[in-house]
Amino acid sequence: MLFLIIFVVLLAILALNVVIVPQSKAYVIQRFGSYHATWDAGIHVKLPIADKIARKCSLKEQVFDTPESKAITKDNVSLVLDAVLYFYVMDPEKYTYGVEHPMQALDNLTATTMRNLIGALELDECLTSRDTINKEMCEVLDRATDPWGIRVTRVELKNITPPHDIQEAMEQQMRAERERRAAILQAEGTKRSQVLVAEGEKESAILRADAEKYAKVAAAEAEAEAILKVQTAKAEALERLNKAAPNDQVIKIQALDAFAQAANGQATKIIVPSEIASLAGLGVAVKDALKD
């Protein structure tokens, strides 16, 4: 019976000292008040009375939202800043023994780092260089928290809030800038429109001049072709006439017909060749002889 009681007591003591460490956790163990070991995920047995769990650390990446803090820029503008830190515990032993209150220390270190970085920049640089500020803060905090067993992976500035009067001045500046850009765009549009109209008129004038030129060229070519055809017809007529070998009487009769056509025109003066005059006299003599 006594043996059974002793066995049950030992079994209870063993059960109470069996520790199961879950995944993504790490337990820091102290033995007689000093650091002994860091237990990872799995089953572990601690010595009764001698061993003690000093801290249970999460190895997952954690998010720390820092409270709002104020900082003054290089050009003496007061800003309200709000940042978010992403970190994880790299060394549970250092995290346990490196600093008394890790989150409070991290908060104070973040606030002082932001003040130092913002104090070296002007307002415009603070508003337009968030990536640079985030990168520099991450590097500074990572170096500073290394003795604490903390690895800072990323820092993001959520809000940078200037005073109300500065916000109004910035809004007025942005409004004036938008109006200036609108005026520039409108002027460029008007200029472009006038240029297009002038180019259109220029092209239209060129096309009209080309059309007139082509019309005159076509008319001149048609007239030249007509003259060529008339001269060709005359040349053919003369050639046929030469082939027929006309005598002087036929030529004189043709000349008389040409003279008659000329007399029917609008000419006020007519010069009669001597051959036509003698031919006319011959006609009158023939007429008188026929009457006799």
Image: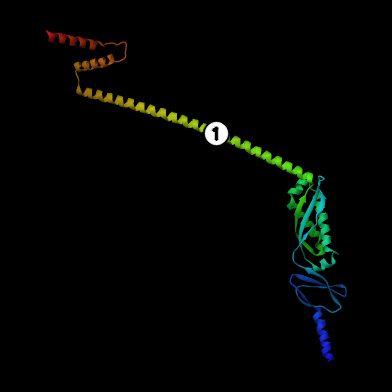
Towards the viewer: 142 or 79: 79
Which residue occupies 26% across, 25% down?
Answer: 236
Asked whether, in this view, residue 30 is left or right of residue 235, the answer is: right
Which residue occupies 76% across, 49% down?
Answer: 126
Q: Position of residue 154 (x, y in %)?
A: 74, 58
Q: Position of residue 144 (x, y in %)?
A: 81, 59
Would you identify the image quadrant in which residue 216 lies? Answer: top left
| Image quadrant containing the C terminus | top left
Coloration of the structure image: rainbow
- Provide the residue designation for mark 1: 197
Towards the viewer: 212 or 250: 212
Which residue occupies 42% across, 30% down?
Answer: 214
Which residue occupies 44% across, 31% down?
Answer: 211
- Determine the residue located farthest toward the left in the rendered image: 292
Query: In this picture, is 118 found above or below 3?
Result: above
Q: Residues within 10 Å of mark 1 (few under 14, many from 20)?
A: few
| Image quadrant containing the N terminus | bottom right
Towards the viewer: 136 or 122: 122
Q: Position of residue 84 (x, y in %)?
A: 76, 57
Would you identify the image quadrant in which residue 110 lies? Answer: bottom right
Query: In this picture, is 24 found above or below 202?
Result: below
